[in-house]
Image: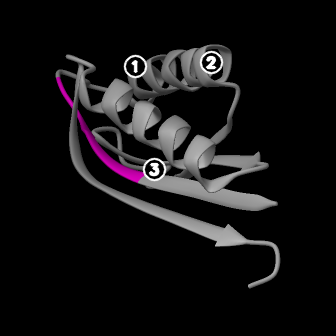
Amino acid sequence: MWVGWIEFDILLGDVQSLKEKRSIIRSLLAELKRRFDVSVAEVGDHDQYRRSQLGAGLVAADRAHLVEVLTAVERFVAARPELELLSARQRELHSED
């Protein structure tokens, strides 16, 4: 069994309030869940309206599938026009590690 996750540091574009931020983040998280069947959450920078840290996780039978999905998630987030992806950190672990 493989467990993997990816963490994103994101700068939001023309956002003026936490309410606007929540709307964008909620929409992004829902789309990631729907499109890639991963677990996702906002994991940091909750009180800053132009910054966010997001995490996505996945359990898979093989490493190739895990890496493929996490890479696709990263490409999807990076392509979003309403935000700038500042960094992404990806990690995979095997259950026997």
Q: Give the residue at x 61% y 24%.
A: 36
Q: Earlier in the sequence, mark 1 or mark 3?
A: 1
Marks 1 and 2 close (CB-CB < 8 Å): no
Q: Which mark is residue 30?
A: 2
Residue at the location (53% across, 15% down)? Answer: 27
Question: In percent of the image, x 50 and y 53: which residue is there?
Answer: 6
Q: Amino acid at mark 2?
A: Ala
Secondary structure state at the residue bearing disc 2: helix
Q: Position of residue 15 (x, y in %)?
A: 25, 24
> Which of 11 and 70 lies nearest the eye of the viewer?
70
Tell which tag, 1 or 2, sits nearer the viewer.
2
**Residue 21 seen in the current view:** yes
18 sits left or right of 55 in the view? left
| Quadrant assignment for the C terminus | bottom right
Please tell me which of labels 3 and 2 falls first in the chain: 2
Instruction: Give the magenta range.
Output: 8-13
Label 1 CA crowd tier, 10 Å (few <14, some 14–19, many 20+): some
Q: Give the CA separation, mark 3 to mark 2.
A: 20 Å
- The label nearer to you, 3 versus 2, is 2
Alpha-carbon distance for marks 1 and 3? 12 Å
Residue at the disc numbered 3: 47
**Disc 1 marks which residue?**
20
